[in-house]
Image (cartoon, rainbow, N blue to C red):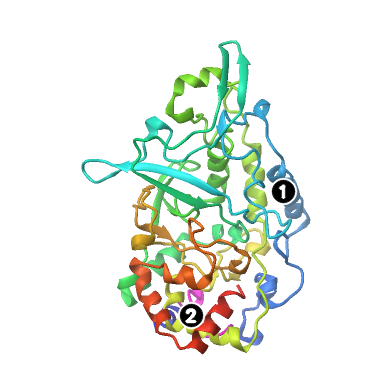
Amino acid sequence: MFGRRIAVAAGALLLASCTAEPLAQEMPKNADRIASAELGVAGTGFGDPLPGLGTAELTKFGVGETEFTTAEDPADGLGPVFNEASCVACHLGPGEAVGGTTGRLETRFGRTRADGSFDPMAEFGGSLIQDHGIGFVSVPAGTFTFVGETVPPEATMTARRRTQPLFGLGLVDATPESTFRSIALLQAIFAPQIAGTPSVVPDPSTGSNHALGKFGWKAQVPSLFVFSGDAYLNEMGITTPLFPNENCPQGKCELLQFNPAADTPNDDGTGVVRFNDFMTFLGPPPRGPRNLKTGIGNAVAAAIGCLDCHVQTLRTGPNAVAALDEVYYHPFSDFLLHDMGSLGDGITQNQATGKLMRTQPLWGLRTQAALLHDGRVTTIEAAIEAHDGQGARARARFGRLDPFSRDALVAFLKSL
């Protein structure tokens, strides 16, 4: 099967696994640093730091977590339009674990131009809606009341997107770009019908226009550092040296004269560094209980093609941080773009046109109450049945499974 061919062809990269988890004696010598809960070793829970961090790194993690959970206000630069006042307002759970998701839905909009291309409608504040405003302000320019943005009637499409968990993304960030490009190449060779596309995006932190996007529903963000600055601006309205320009409320830039935090950047970049530190050192989601049935389900997932895109095992590159240095981890994603047909959200970002979506990592799946990018379904079965485009073949194979195999597959997915 394709997953086995990828593993053989990629060798030490361990790009995919088509059998149950390898035995402990088959694991590499640094197995003690591989997402400890995945190996059944105590010490990593939701929201915990990566196992094996040193004192300096744990300090950065703690300082970053404090910044992540601190609410901003207009005096800090919040707004004038925004979505939430803190990172944790969207990234909390399960329970009180910092770094997960509340399931909050955000809105994007746009329309199709005459030539068929996507128009993000920047003149109306698109494509992302900031649905809060800081309210009444009195400044030298006068008084004004900032309210949240709304989808303009001129828009012809809207999309809802769930905020995503951040657990373990430092491992993804520490994985060489060549790994993801190799996966795409091997998919093109062995299974062209589901081959993913690397998302090539600009990186404002380096000035490159050819960075590999890995984060976000459209793989539109190349690194956790850029993600930190992007979210600070677009979710909280706080400018930084990385993103120095305020969002114009509903596209009306003249309203910025009433912004009480007119000096830019609002933050000198310290907040971005701290957010990045927290996410970089945030541990992966712990694996749930496993048994023979979940092991069989793992094999079923490989057999019907789920693991062709939801690649089970990846490896970080050389890293000065021991906890991130050439370690294996299990995100169940190739972090590539795939044509999902009717499951696409219609929005274009960079190379990711309306039908293209990044493969969603499945680790931590058991904690998610709403599934797919817009939270439209609440069961794993319904999520699989909604797959379309390049996911249609796996969906069809799922539909033909006997009851035991289907039950084992669902049990496996509920163990992630």
- Residue at 33% of width from left, 75% of height from top? 191
Residue matched to label 2: 301
Q: Residue 99: which quarter of the image? A: bottom right
Q: Is residue 337 left or right of residue 412?
A: left
Q: Earlier in the sequence, mark 1 or mark 2?
A: 1
Q: Is residue 151 left or right of residue 258?
A: left
Q: Is residue 160 left or right of residue 79?
A: left
User: Amino acid type of disc 1?
Assistant: Glu
Q: Which mark is residue 65?
A: 1
**Number of disc labels:** 2
Which stretch did the figure color magenta?
Answer: 9-21
In front of the other: 25 or 19: 19
* Image height of 9 relative to 250, above or below: below
Q: Position of residue 223 (x, y in %)?
A: 52, 51
- Residue at 45% of width from left, 23% of height from top? 253
Q: Residue 339: which quarter of the image? A: bottom left
In front of the other: 231 or 249: 249
In the rendered structure, does residue 355 fall within the stretch colored magenta?
Answer: no
User: Amino acid type of disc 2?
Assistant: Ala
In the rendered structure, does residue 19 fall within the stretch colored magenta?
Answer: yes
Secondary structure mostly taken by the magenta-highlighted segment of the chain: loop
Q: Position of residue 22 (x, y in %)?
A: 59, 84
In front of the other: 70 or 401: 401
CA separation in Å, label 1 and label 2: 35 Å
Element on which disc 1 rests: helix
Q: Position of residue 100 (x, y in %)?
A: 64, 56
Q: Are marks 1 and 2 in contact (CB under 8 Å)?
A: no
- Residue at 46% of width from left, 79% of height from top? 7
Q: Quadrant of the C terminus?
A: bottom right
